[in-house]
Image (cartoon, grey):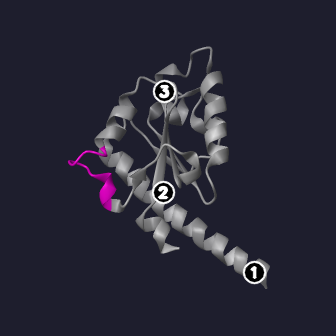
Amino acid sequence: MRFLKKSPWILHYAATSCNGCDIELLACLTPMYDVERFGIVNTGNPKHADIFLVTGSVNEESRQVVENLYAQIPEPKVVVAIGACALSGGIFRDAYNVYGGIDKIIPVDIYVPGCAARPESIIDGIVQALEILEQRASERKRQRKLVAL
């Protein structure tokens, strides 16, 4: 399953935030940082995604979207929470309508801290996600072999 590590597709969702992390995430796609050198492709379709990148905190409206997108991403999948808002609610955590970080709603595998998270940190988080994705793909393959026996 080495193909997943060489060409993962990412899906980015911007929950409620100031959009600072979203701007830094877009910087990762520019020639200066070039996250595509890892074979990463940005997709808008959750059914094609391997890695789910989420920025921003969660409120009632974004909660439903995050849950729906997460449910549509096929296994194996990895979730990366980017920025202080995605980790804990950030500066919005005391707001009446904010639940907190993404991990209050869906399981998170990688946390990328920062306000706003730097492109280098985001790329490091994505590279860590590639390792987890590869491990999960290998486990699924091994489980299928056991079931076939």
Q: Is residue 99 left or right of residue 113?
A: right
Image position, residue 17 (x, y; %): 46, 24
In the rendered structure, which disc, 1 or 2, sits on the residue that comes first in sequence?
2
**Amino acid type, label 3:** Gly
Question: What kind of element bears circle 2?
Answer: helix
- Mark 1 and mark 2 in contact? Answer it, CB < 8 Å: no
Label number found at residue 146:
1
* Residues shaded magenta: 28-37
Q: In this view, does 81 lie above or below 51?
A: above
Q: Kindly tell me whether residue 111 is visible in this rendering.
A: yes
Residue at which label 2 appears: 129
Image position, residue 46 (x, y; %): 56, 46
Residue at 71 percent across and 75 percent down: it is: 144
- The crowding category of the residue bearing disc 2, from other C-alpha atoms within 10 Å (few below 14, some 14 to 19, many at least 20), is many
Residue 35 shown in magenta: yes
- The crowding category of the residue bearing disc 3, from other C-alpha atoms within 10 Å (few below 14, some 14 to 19, many at least 20), is some
Instruction: Give the CA separation, mark 2 to mark 3.
Output: 22 Å
Residue at 37 percent across and 61 percent down: it is: 39
Comparing 17 with 66, the one in front is 66
Image position, residue 78 (x, y; %): 55, 54
Q: Is residue 122 left or right of residue 84?
A: left
Q: Quadrant where the C terminus lies?
A: bottom right
Q: Is residue 74 above or below residue 11?
A: below
Residue at 54 percent across and 32 percent down: it is: 88
Residue at which label 3 appears: 90
Q: Nearer the viewer, mark 1 or mark 3?
A: 1
In the rendered structure, which disc, 1 or 3, sits on the residue that comes first in sequence?
3
- The crowding category of the residue bearing disc 1, from other C-alpha atoms within 10 Å (few below 14, some 14 to 19, many at least 20), is few
Image position, residue 21 (x, y; %): 38, 33
